[in-house]
Amino acid sequence: MSLRVVVLGAENVGKSDLIYKSSIKQEDYVTDIEILDSCAKKNTSIAPGDNVITWTDAFIVVYDICVHSSFEQAIKILDIINKARASVYCPALLLGNKTDLEHRRTVGVEEGHQAALEYNCQYYEVSAAEDFVTISIAFQALLRETKIIQQNKPLLKRRKSSLVNVSKKLGAMFGKKDSEMDRKRSTCDVAGPKTIFEKA
């Protein structure tokens, strides 16, 4: 199984510390992770209809718990992703970074939880500089959700195909019945006046 992820967020929130390309073992399978490095671009956000929404299997949106404006930008990114999900669903992970600087916190944990509930995404707080365990747990959770979605895609396609086939069969069946009814109506309409004139 392979997983394509894009990491987004404001500048200097610690995205570069979270970006890597490797294999993670989870539940007896290996996942190859390909990550789009938004740090290499001036634009670290996305726009509605952006190709990256089609390219990626999952989003990681990072903010600095010590800089509230970075959280506000993360919310804007989640809003764009949420609107795009109407046609292409992608799991998202909201990641508050720099918990090692708790004494400088300006974004409350409750704010992160509320955003996760509003935008239907997973939420974790980590320290990219110190806390590898929590980062691993967050990635594992994202992998698990993405795996379920990828496994269900063929099933959804089969269901859609079956529905189309059933619709075609019903359409053909009812179309045939409608044609027969039209012919019967035409016969009755023609026969009716003849009977009247014969009686007269």
Image (tube, rainbow, N blue to C red):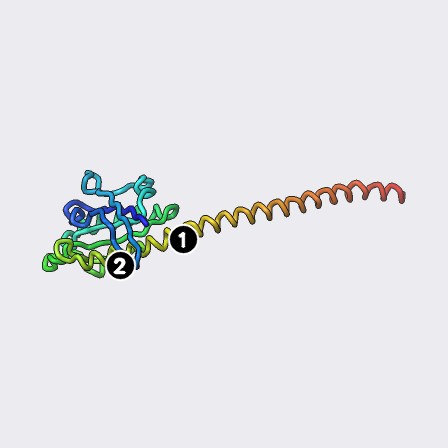
- State the residue at coordinates (67%, 46%): 177
Q: Tag on residue 176?
A: none
Q: CA distance from mark 1 to mark 2?
A: 28 Å
Give the camera-side residue of 129 and 31.
Answer: 31
Give the camera-side residue of 193 and 109.
Answer: 109
User: Residue 78, position in %: x, y?
Assistant: 28, 49
Amino acid type, label 1: Asn
Badge 1 is on which residue?
Answer: 152
- State the residue at coordinates (29%, 53%): 30
Q: Is residue 178 left or right of residue 22?
A: right
| Pair 1/2: label in front | 1
Give the camera-side residue of 156 and 46.
Answer: 156
Q: Is residue 10 above or below residue 98?
A: above
Per the image, label 2 sits on a secondary structure element best described as: helix
- The quadrant of the rendering that contains the C terminus is top right
Q: Is residue 79 left or right of residue 127?
A: right
- State the residue at coordinates (15%, 58%): 131
Q: Earlier in the sequence, mark 1 or mark 2?
A: 2
Badge 2 is on which residue?
Answer: 114
- State the residue at coordinates (50%, 47%): 161
Q: Is residue 112 above or below residue 38?
A: below
Q: Residues within 10 Å of mark 1 (few under 14, many from 20)?
A: few
Q: Quarter of the image holding residue 172?
A: top right
Q: Residues within 10 Å of mark 2 (few under 14, many from 20)?
A: few
User: Residue 105, position in %: x, y?
Assistant: 13, 57
Per the image, label 1 sits on a secondary structure element best described as: helix
Q: Is residue 189 above or below residue 102?
A: above
Q: Quarter of the image holding residue 101?
A: bottom left
User: Residue 160, position in %: x, y?
Assistant: 48, 49
Amino acid type, label 2: Gln
**Residue at the bottom extreme of this rendering:** 110
